[in-house]
């Protein structure tokens, strides 16, 4: 899936190669959580964005494993915003 399948906050129109750069912000408090420099992929159907690195986040304590859907077998932690913990 393409990153424009998600609602993203556009920061600037890229450089000479005309790439578009985005920052990912908390929907509640607008804290910056990551940007396109660490973007890996996104999936509109699953409403998810994958970043190599994120900042200002609080990791959950439980590791979940998906049992159904496109991501079956994937393990993940829930993340909350470090600014507002939502």
Image (tube, rainbow, N blue to C red):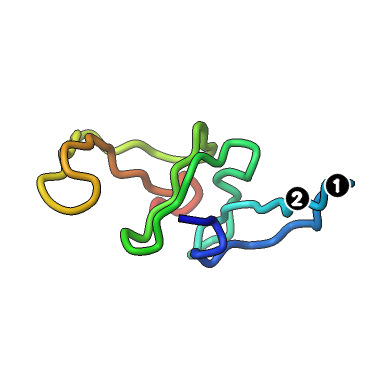
User: Quick check: 40 above or below 14?
Assistant: above
Image quarter of the C terminus: bottom left
Count neighbours of disc 2 (C-alpha within 10 A) and say few if under 14, some if 14 to 19, many if 20 or more: few
Q: Nearer the viewer, residue 43 or 49?
A: 43
Work out how far the residue at label 2 is from the one at label 1, CA to CA, in angstroms. Answer: 6 Å
Relative horizontal placement of residue 21, taking residue 57 as reference (left or right): right
Relative horizontal placement of residue 74, taking residue 84 as reference (left or right): left
Q: Position of residue 37 (x, y in %)?
A: 65, 37
Residue 58 location, quadrant: top left
Who's the residue at 58% across and 59% down the image?
30
Count neighbours of disc 1 (C-alpha within 10 A) and say few if under 14, some if 14 to 19, many if 20 or more: few
Relative horizontal placement of residue 40, taking residue 16 as reference (left or right): left
Image quarter of the N terminus: bottom left
| Residue at the farthest left position | 67
Say whether marks 2 and 1 touch (CB < 8 Å): yes
Q: Position of residue 8 (x, y in %)?
A: 58, 62
Q: Secondary structure at mark 1?
A: loop
Who's the residue at 45% across and 51% down the image?
42
User: Quick check: 20 above or below 54?
Assistant: below
Q: How many marks?
A: 2
Which disc, if any, is residue 68? none
Q: Which residue is mark 2?
A: 19
User: Quick check: 49 above or below 75?
Assistant: below
Which disc, if any, is residue 15? 1
Who's the residue at 16% across and 37% down the image?
73
Q: Secondary structure at mark 2?
A: loop
Residue 25 location, quadrant: bottom right
Q: Position of residue 18 (x, y in %)?
A: 81, 52
């Amino acid at each position: 899936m393409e990153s424009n399948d998600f609602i993203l906050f556009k920061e600037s129109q890229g450089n000479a190669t005309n790439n578009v750069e985005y920052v990912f912000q908390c929907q509640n408090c607008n804290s910056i959580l990551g940007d396109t420099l660490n973007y890996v992929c996104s999936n509109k159907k699953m409403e998810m964005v994958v970043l190599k690195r994120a900042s200002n986040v609080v990791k959950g304590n439980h590791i979940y494993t998906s049992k159904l859907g496109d991501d079956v077998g994937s393990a993940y932690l829930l993340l909350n915003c470090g600014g507002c913990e939502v």
